[in-house]
């Protein structure tokens, strides 16, 4: 499949600024879109169904300012990277409001062309890395669900075999090898909160100086924000959140385990995220 052209939307009420940005990226493999105000930009994004990787907006614009505009972009198309441009006089106001729009970067005017190009390139790297991690998360969950289905079928097949114990042990040994080979950390809990499964990555991430997490109470090992996901996942089918460990961040995916329509426990998967 041919890769879709990277789209950048530039929003500024001064047309000379928009022309300067178009010239700056003339030699880059980007499709540059422009709008002169927030309402026009939101209409364009809606027509494209959010199919824009990065939005650069001026702060001072008639009507809707840049932060309010980017806040709406964040609410409707949260995967889009958002950057705000403005003069030095507005720096304090923007820094105070920057979290409202989950803004990736504030760039003062006048900008340095090379520094701006580098910033845009790095921002797009973050975008595509997040997309890749999102895809990896979905693939891991799909693989886990397939493994769960295989294990259910194996239970029926094992009952029909005379060498039941040997076959089951081999299957479990293979399943553990598969789990340890995965790049994500996986932790399983029974309904009491006891950790009954932890692959190699989970032990490296969360066990500390303990040899394994298996057999430990989850609330005694995991940070509160992660442990709370176990109870929440028992109430819903699936949850996602972001969890930071030192300089690294992980997308945490919770999935409820059911066997014969009975709840058996919870699986948490920690998928490494790119730096933002």
Image (spheres, rainbow, N blue to C red):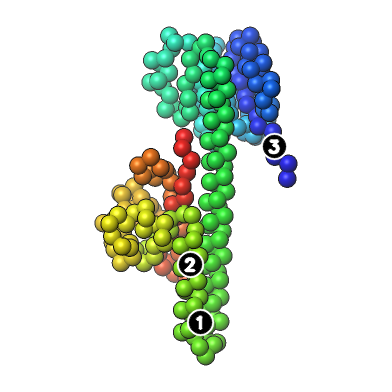
**Percent of width and height locating residue 135:** 57, 48
Left or right position of 3 against 11: right
- Say few, some or many: other residues with alpha carbon within 10 Å of mark 1 (under 14 / 14 to 19 / 20 or more): some
**Tag 3, which secondary structure?**
loop
Q: Give percent across and percent down for residue 171.
A: 50, 75
In space, the residues marked 2 and 3 are separated at their CA atoms by: 37 Å
| Residue bearing mark 2 | 177
| Residue sitting farthest toward the right | 2
Q: Position of residue 72 (x, y in %)?
A: 52, 28
Residue 215 picture quarter: bottom left
> x, y (%) of residue 28?
67, 25
Question: Total number of numbered labels?
Answer: 3
Q: CA distance from mark 2 to mark 1?
A: 16 Å
The answer to whether the residue labelled 3 contacts the one labelled 1, judged by CB atoms less than 8 Å apart, is no
Q: Nearer the viewer, mark 2 or mark 1?
A: 2
Q: Residue furthest front?
A: 114
65, above or below 5, in the image: above
In the structure shown, which secondary structural element does the residue marked by tag 2 occupy?
helix
**Which residue does the image show at 49% across and 78% down from the upper left?**
170
Quadrant that contains the N terminus: top right
Asked whether the residues under the numbered discs 2 and 1 touch, taking CB atoms below 8 Å apart as contact, a structural biologist would say: no
For the residues labelled 3 and 1, the Cα–Cα distance comes to 47 Å
Q: Which residue is mark 1?
A: 167
Q: Earlier in the sequence, mark 3 or mark 1?
A: 3
Residue ID for mark 3: 4
Q: Is residue 74 visible?
A: yes
User: Camera-side residue: 161 or 156?
Assistant: 161
Residue at left offset 52%, top offset 62%: 144
């Amino acid at each position: 499949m041919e890769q879709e052209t990277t789209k950048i939307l530039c929003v500024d009420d001064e047309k000379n600024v928009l022309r300067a940005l178009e010239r700056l990226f003339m030699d880059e493999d980007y499709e540059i879109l422009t709008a002169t105000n927030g309402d026009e930009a939101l209409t364009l994004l809606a027509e494209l169904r959010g199919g824009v990787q990065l939005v650069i907006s001026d702060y001072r614009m008639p009507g809707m300012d840049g932060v309010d505009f980017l806040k709406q972009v964040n609410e409707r198309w949260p995967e889009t990277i958002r950057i705000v441009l403005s003069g030095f006089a507005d720096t304090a106001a923007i820094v105070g409001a920057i979290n409202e729009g989950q803004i990736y970067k504030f760039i003062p005017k006048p900008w340095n062309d090379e520094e701006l190009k580098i910033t845009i390139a790095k921002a797009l790297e973050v975008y595509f890395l997040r997309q890749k991690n999102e895809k990896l998360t979905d693939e891991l969950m799909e693989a886990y669900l397939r493994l769960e289905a295989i294990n259910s079928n194996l239970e029926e097949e094992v009952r029909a075999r005379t060498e039941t114990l040997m076959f089951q042990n081999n299957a479990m040994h293979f399943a553990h090898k598969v789990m340890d080979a995965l790049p994500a950390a996986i932790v399983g809990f029974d309904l009491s909160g006891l950790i009954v499964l932890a692959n190699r990555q989970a032990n490296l991430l969360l066990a500390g100086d303990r040899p394994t997490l298996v057999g430990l109470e989850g609330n005694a090992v995991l940070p509160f924000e992660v442990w709370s996901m176990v109870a929440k996942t028992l109430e819903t089918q699936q949850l996602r959140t972001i969890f930071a460990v030192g300089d690294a961040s992980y997308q945490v995916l919770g999935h409820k385990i059911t066997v014969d329509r009975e709840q058996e426990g919870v699986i948490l998967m920690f998928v490494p995220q790119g730096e933002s």
